[in-house]
Structure formats: C-alpha cells, structure tokens
Image (spheres, rainbow, N blue to C red):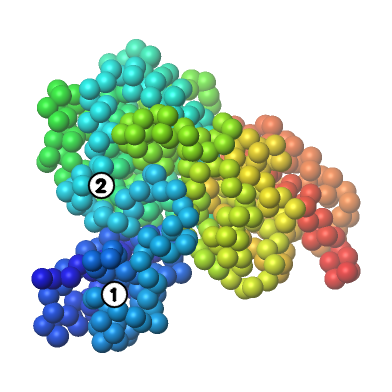
Amino acid sequence: MSVTIYVPRDSAAIALGANDVAAAIASEAEKRGIGISIVRNGSRGMFWLEPMVEVETAQGRIAYGPVDPADVSGLFDAGFLQGGAHALAQGLTEEIPYLKNQERLTFARVGITDPVSLSDYLAHEGYAGLQRAIGMSSEAIVQEVLDSGLRGRGGAAFPTGIKWKTVANAQAAQKYIVCNADEGDSGTFSDRMVMEDDPFVLVEGMTIAGLAVGATQGYIYVRSEYPHAIAALNEAIDTANQHGYLGDDILGSGKIFHLEVRMGAGAYICGEETALLESLEGKRGVVRAKPPLPALEGLFGKPTVINNVISLATVPIVLARGAAFYKNYGVGRSHGTLPFQLAGNVRYGGLVEKAFGLTLRQLLEDFGGGTLSGRPIRAVQVGGPLGAYMPQQQLDTPLDYEAFAAIGAMVGHGGMVVFDDGVDMAQQARYAMEFCAIESCGKCTPCRIGSTRGVEVIDKIIANDNRPQQIHLLRDLCDTMLNGSLCAMGGLTPYPVLSALNHFPEDFGSPAEKAA
C-alpha cells in the first residue's frame, strides 16, 4: 500500500526548493523500492518551514520542514513515511500552534487539497455554496451576502452586498463580474495563495456573483508577476467548464456564466478599480473620474461588480454555511475573518487567518514571534506601501476597520511589514513619496506633481536645508494630496509620510538630534 506524501506547489515553496525536494523524494523511494504517491498541495502559509513535507499516517498528516533535498535520504532512514522521529519533524500538522490557533474559513482548504483537483475540492465542501445559490433567487443571494456583513477585502472595506445590489438593480443587457487580482502591495500574498492553492474557490465565488447580479461573463485580472497563479486558474477554469460548473448551462440550471483570465502588465495603479477597467478594455491604465460608478457604468460601459480575490473567495462559505455563521466571527462592523500576512523583519513570516478583533501586538508576537533580528519592533506598516507606519504605542489597537481608521491607519488588504529599531523612518517616508511618483498614472496634479515635490522636500529635510520650513511645507503638501487626488494612490500616500513624521519626529531632526 503506497504512502501519500504532500509537497507544496505554491510559488513561495517552489522558490525555496519544493520542486527539487519532490524530485528527491520520488527518486529515493524508487531507489528503495517503496511505493509512494506524491500530491502537490498548496502551502499551509508557514513560510519559515517551507518546503514543508507532510506524510499521511493513521494518526493524521505529520509535517517535516524545512526540508532540503540533502535531508531526504535521512528522512527515509528515520522512517518518516510512518511518521518517524527526526530533527525536522514538526508533529501533526493540525497541531502546530501557528496553524491550530487560526480560524480558517476562506483558507479552509489551502494546504490540504491538490489545488487543481476538482474531486478534492468537492470532497472538502467545494461547490456547496453554488449548489445552494442555484436554488435561490438573485435577490436572496444578494441578501445573504448583505446579511453576512462581508466587506471588500481589497482595502476600501465597502460592503460587498451593497455593491452587488446596485449592479443587480441596474438595467442592462450585459453585466460583468471582474476580479481584481492585481495584488501589488508590499508584504501581501493572500490573493496569490488563493489563486495558486485553491483556485476553484475563486471560480465558485465569481460564479455565485454572476448568478446574484445577472452577469454572464467574468474576468480575473491577474498581475503578470504571478505565472503560477495564472496557470492554476486556467486549469481550474478548464476543468469547471468540462464538468458543467461554468458555461451555458451551469449544473443543468440553464444559467450562464463564462470566465476568463486576463494578464496585467505590472502597473501598480491598475489595482485601482477604474484603472483596471481601462486596462481590461485594452487602454492605458489611467484612473477614471467617478461618477459614474463602475457598478452602473463599468467594463465597456456596462454594470460591473469589481471585487478583490479574498472578497469573492469568501462568498462560497457564506452561501454554504449561511450569513449568520460568517457574521458571528469578528467585532463591531468588521465581520468574519481576514487572512493577515506577516512579512519584513519577522521571525515567523506567513499567513494567519483570524477573526477581526485580536490586537496587532497579539498577531506580531503570538504568531510572528517578534523580529527575526531579535531586536525590538519599532514600526509596522499595515495595509501596503500606502499604509501608515504604526509605532509601539499603537500595537495594542484591535484589528478592526473602524479602530484603525480612528487613529489614521487602515487595515487594507491585511499585509504587514515589520521593522526593528534599526529603521530610518525619514527614509521610509521618502520611499512612500518616491513610490507614488513612480507608480502614479499621472492624470491628476496632486498625485503626479505632489509626490515628486514630496521627494524633494524630504531630501531637504534630511539634508537640514531650512528644516522647520520644509517640514511645514511637507505637511501642507500631504494635505493637498489627501484632499485633492483623484484616487487613493495620491490620497493615501500621505498616510505613511505623516505617520512617520508624527510618531518618529527624531528621524526628521538634525544628525546631532538623531545621535542623541
């Protein structure tokens, strides 16, 4: 009887040598005449243990990691196919505290199944949400999403159900579902993990969205830097078409939904929904003025639902388990869970799906283990390159949209980049302005010119060139960008700049003050 061994196919694991490890295991088993079956699963999101190999035993799946090809022979000698003791043994995967203490709803299957196996997906509650949705009216589906309290997971946190209801009520012969998979924020990888490690859940979520609003065509706009995600999505879409989960007659219901992947060319601004639509239409990715809202005049001028990957990937569990099940997680108006992503100078980088409400400190210390350098955390940037830098005194803020907004920060996409006490916050503020200058679409003056002037002003502050006046000018410039920019690109760039200036003023002082 062959033993099943799981080796991740996630691109993070591959970058750390997972393909070589899988090949070494296959070769060693053949050499020893042992029958094994290798399943390329998704990553569990514990990246410090990748490549993490799991072995199916009578007790459950036993994890070993991080495994190097050179470790494989020793693992066989130690009887790892039976869960034998070894220096790399991590015990039962489900009992690893980092994983055990999460609430995995959107990521329920990630790391457990073969991502492109439909039978695996169906065996783990896959398509249960679509099966239920087919028997419901469009209005009932929209109401279920509204009642769940699900808000956009791309950063703006706008209620998903309200966006769907607007499109559902719009009168048009053609409507579209567009998935914004242009994940470009520093420290974020949850979208990539869904697409690579559980692509069917995104396909199912978009199909349910199509039924809810009367859209028959969907597009997934993926950044070109994600080739593994694109390949997994295309394979899943082909399989769904072959088995009647997509196409002209979904599961014999007579309902229509078609889905295609479109590859972006790497512009950060195309993560903004209207610039994304321009790019999808074959034009330069430039922000559109609103109104009209995309929900009424979106792709090709038609009513369009634009949601983030995590928003759409969460819809199947809302439909399968019911709105009340999902709404019971979280705090205040932040319902459900969010996959937080720990990156930067952190000991245990990876993905943590938790219900809203735990504090930033709990996430960074209980899961992240503090900094990799062992030095104190000085700042954490939450919400991507346009998110605020949060100092030690704000680490006890609960992870909740409203609590973050109250202190001039944002949860955003849940990405977190950790910095220890060696960071220069003036340089980080400069980076934010420079990033905006490079990535701006150039349509509006506050963003295009403001960011360029911002870099110049910060350089003068660092050089102690009339510093007090330059700091006053920087604040004035941030106010103009915040209130005058056409979209969030220029409107949010002041967040990291002002947070650095407000919480770490010593880094904007003279060299003598810095030394003191």
| Rendered image quadrant of residue 189 | bottom left
Horizontal arrangement in the rendering, residue 18 relative to residue 87 (left or right): left
Examine the rendered structure and indicate whether residue 87 appears above or below residue 258. Answer: below
Q: Residue at x 44, y 24 (%)?
A: 147
Percent from the top left, x then y, of residue 150?
A: 46, 32
Closer mark to the observer between disc 2 and disc 1: 1
Side of 87 where 236 appears, left or right:
left
Which residue reaches farthest front? 59
Assign a secondary structure to mark 2. Answer: loop
> Badge 2 is on which residue?
124
Of the two numbered discs 2 and 1 on the same chain, state the one appearing first in sequence: 1
Q: Amino acid at mark 2?
A: His
Q: Write the residue at 15% across / 39% down.
A: 241
Image-based side of 104 in relation to 9, left or right: right
Residue 302 percent coordinates (x, y)? 36, 21
Mark 2–mark 1 distance (CA, rounded to whole Å): 24 Å
From the viewer's side, name the closer residue of 381 and 399: 399
Point out which mark residue 83 bears: 1
